[in-house]
Image (cartoon, rainbow, N blue to C red):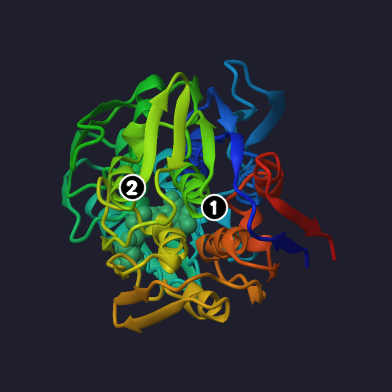
């Protein structure tokens, strides 16, 4: 397994290109199942999860052509996906267990073929990650669902039927699955308490380009008037707001000055407000954002993760690393997942002073962090260790970096280009 070596202390300056959003690309790729036409997606990030989704779709019969880099200044890849003929409606466990987002083929397969057999995704490091809201919503749309031998077996006689679905809690994936299924249902579906994440809006925009009739994208109420079929379309994947926030915090923690090309302030407003409170300057510039730290130390801040437009749970581990060396104490409360503090013991091994009390962590600022051998446990915990390593004195070695490769495209290249002393040791 590869390792990442970082020698901390360098101030990062320069430019980082922001890739297309992994968490938009995955549902967008699943949406190709909804049409016999060709869906052309550009600005796709080059990530392990994207390849996993491509493999998964191809075993359903989706043909996929990768056309290199896109136009428009983005470095993202272009995929043309065509599900003219779906050869299988079964999604096997060996694929689902490597990527939970595989569940996003359930709604499209059911809507298009009237049946689907998708392995139940297991839990993961950050929580049990149930899919009950996906299944309850599909049953409300008329699907019959049974759970057998670790598989979800879903079917519907004729078409799904539009209805009013009230989500008991905000769920990004469930909103996306039900949105895609409702596009081909008979009649109108209203999804109340829908997720408002930009990735959900990006999916809705693409579905509309494919001929879907969707109102309320970006709000907590989506109204979908079902159609009998969708057509192909071209769509550019939205910029990755989590990558943007991550590299903004890399600038902050190293006292650097970085331009994030493709970064959009409107996608990270709550994060930007928090960073400004911490003494970080974030300024929109032509085609991106400029991030630099105003004073010699970061100010302590309190953060609570919430569904969009609140502070994103996917930036919680990163901001915890960022506030490890403030003058005062910060409190971070995780309200979305039940076990998303696995980065805490690893940060403490680097000298941070963090105590967890239930869903909250108290971070008392220390003078500085020291490099150590640490272990990544999940995607965002891994990158918080990278941020800590960039600021720590001495060398940090991070094991199990395959977690990073799932969500950060060319991470060490992008950071090294801004002066970080970082390298990947291939095992
Ligand atoms: C998406 O996961 C993202 N993944 C996650 O990003 C992100 O952390 C999460 O949304 C929250 O923003 C992708 O988009 C591929 P949820 P998802 O359904 O859809 C509970 C990353 O690092 N829940 O919004 O799985 C669930 O347990 C990943 O890029 C149910 O109880 O998240 C959680 O507590 C990590 N039943 C809460 O809802 C359900 O049926 C929010 O989960 C579904 C979810």
Residue beneath label 1, please? 254
Up-down relation of residue 369 to residue 315 (above or below): below
Q: Which residue reaches farthest right?
A: 427
**Quadrant of the image containing the C terminus:** bottom right
Q: Quadrant of ligand 1?
A: bottom left
Disc 2 element: helix
Residue 107 picture location, percent across and down: 40, 47
Instruction: Identify which residue, 251 or 346, lies in the foreground.
Output: 251
Residue at 22%, 54% in the rendered image: 140
Residue at 44%, 62% in the rendered image: 153
Instruction: Identify which residue, 385 or 124, lies in the foreground.
Output: 385
Residue at 21%, 40% in the rendered image: 162
Where, by quadrant of the figure, is residue 413 drawn? Answer: top right
Q: Residues within 10 Å of mark 2 (few under 14, many from 20)?
A: many
Residue 76 picture location, percent across and down: 62, 30
Res. 21 in view: yes
Q: Which residue reaches farthest top?
A: 72
The CA distance from mark 2 to mark 1 is 18 Å
Up-down relation of residue 72 to residue 52 (above or below): above
Is residue 208 left or right of 420 when viewed as pictured? left
Instruction: Identify which residue, 101 or 408, lies in the foreground.
Output: 408
Q: Nearer the viewer, mark 2 or mark 1?
A: 1
**Quadrant of the image containing the N terminus:** bottom right
């Amino acid at each position: 397994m590869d390792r990442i070596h970082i020698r901390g202390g360098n101030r990062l300056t320069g430019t980082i290109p922001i890739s297309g959003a992994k968490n938009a690309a995955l549902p967008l790729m699943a949406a190709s199942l909804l049409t016999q036409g060709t869906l052309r997606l550009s600005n796709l990030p080059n990530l392990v999860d994207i390849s996993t989704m491509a493999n998964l779709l191809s075993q359903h019969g989706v043909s996929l052509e990768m056309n290199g880099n896109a136009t428009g200044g983005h470095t993202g890849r272009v995929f043309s996906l065509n599900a003219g003929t779906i050869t299988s409606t079964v999604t096997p466990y060996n694929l689902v267990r490597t990527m939970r987002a595989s569940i996003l083929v359930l709604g499209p397969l059911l809507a298009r073929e009237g049946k689907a057999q998708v392995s139940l995704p297991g839990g993961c490091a950050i929580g049990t990650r149930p899919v009950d809201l996906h299944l309850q919503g599909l049953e409300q749309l008329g699907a019959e669902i049974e759970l057998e031998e670790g598989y979800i077996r879903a079917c519907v006689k004729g078409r799904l039927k539009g209805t009013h679905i009230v989500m008991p809690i905000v769920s990004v994936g469930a909103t996306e699955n039900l949105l895609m299924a409702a596009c081909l249902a008979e009649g109108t579906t209203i999804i109340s308490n829908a997720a408002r994440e930009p990735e959900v809006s990006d999916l809705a925009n693409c579905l509309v380009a494919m001929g879907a009739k969707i109102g309320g994208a970006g709000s907590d109420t989506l109204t979908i008037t079902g159609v009998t079929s969708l057509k192909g379309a071209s769509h550019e994947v939205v910029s990755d707001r989590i990558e943007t926030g991550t590299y903004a915090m890399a600038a902050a923690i190293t006292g650097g000055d970085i331009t994030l090309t493709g970064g959009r302030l409107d996608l990270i407003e709550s994060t930007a407000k928090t960073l400004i409170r911490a003494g970080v300057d974030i300024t929109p510039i032509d085609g991106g954002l400029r991030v630099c730290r105003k004073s010699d130390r970061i100010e302590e801040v309190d953060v609570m993760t919430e569904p969009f437009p609140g502070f994103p749970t996917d930036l919680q581990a990163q901001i915890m690393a960022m506030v490890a060396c403030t003058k005062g104490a910060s409190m971070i409360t995780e309200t979305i997942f039940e076990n998303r503090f696995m980065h805490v013991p690893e940060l403490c091994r680097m000298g941070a002073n963090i105590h967890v009390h239930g869903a909250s962590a108290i971070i008392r600022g220390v003078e500085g962090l020291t490099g150590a051998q640490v272990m990544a446990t999940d995607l965002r915990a891994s990158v918080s260790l990278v941020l800590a390593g960039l600021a720590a004195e001495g060398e940090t070695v991070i094991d199990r970096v395959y977690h990073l490769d799932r969500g950060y495209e060319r991470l060490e290249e992008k950071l090294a280009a801004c002066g970080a002393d970082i390298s990947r040791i291939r095992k």
